[in-house]
Amino acid sequence: MIRFENLSKSYWVRGERKVVIDHLDLTLPTGRSLALLGRNGAGKSTLMQIIAGILRPDSGRVVSDGTISWPVGFAGSFHPQLTGAENVRFIARIYGVDGDDLVAFVAHFAELGKHYHMPVRSYSSGMRARLTFGASMGIRFDTYLVDEATSVGDAAFRAKSREYFADRVKNASAILVSHEMGQVRQFCDAGIVLSEGKLLYFEDLEEAIRVHLQLVEAKRSR
């Protein structure tokens, strides 16, 4: 269960205050894979970072009764001066899992070769995404936050990523951000749409997609 209690977040942009999360009061169900939909700039990544505890809201709070992953695909998840393997070992200590096992799992999963033992600052964005996704899949969370990360790499790596993700969410919840509606339909069974700082929950995934596409088209028509 994840519950938003009077949650708000805003930024100052060119001297004007832009509200991206506006007094949210909503409880997300347990055991569902939710598509987080919204047009570009709606605040999806901001909301994901707040849920993960990386970003502080202006007001309100997020309440959860389970463990939540960091946003997979978020470049700030790892220390740039440490190697990929060192970052993974540090994460293992934080989450209380076996460091050797997690380091070995990510080495096999991420397919980074010698780069795994080089500083993360030398990685491309795709390599960082593979590292963060691999580390996340190596730990059993109650809720996985995934931001476009299953689209990284060649066809074989994408297929492997989706297979692991599908296995993990069999016994967990997930919040997935993706612009690929095919991927949304593959992994998600309900949807939440973020628009104008408000979040709407849809039990019917197709209804969520329909509302999202209508909002995108309305924005284009302005």
Image (spheres, rainbow, N blue to C red):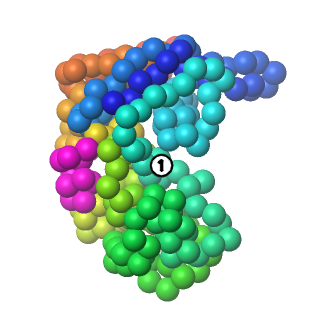
Among the 4 quarters of the image, the one containing residue 105: bottom left
Q: Position of residue 161 (x, y in %)?
A: 29, 60
Q: Is residue 6 above or below residue 191?
A: above
> Considering only vertical position in the picture, is 36 above or below 81?
above
Residue 218 locus on image (x, y percent): 43, 15
Query: In front here: 43 or 47?
Result: 47
| Residue under the point 25% across and 44% down | 172
Q: Is residue 221 visible?
A: no
Q: Main secondary structure of the magenta part?
A: helix
Q: Quadrant of residue 102?
A: bottom left
* Residue 114, percent from left and from top: 49, 86
Give the left or right position of residue 34, taking residue 116 as reference: left
Image quarter in which the N terminus is found: top left
Dot 1: element: strand
| Residue drawn 50% across the image and 71% down it | 89
Please report the bounds of the magenta region as a residue range.
163-172
Q: Which residue is mark 1?
A: 70
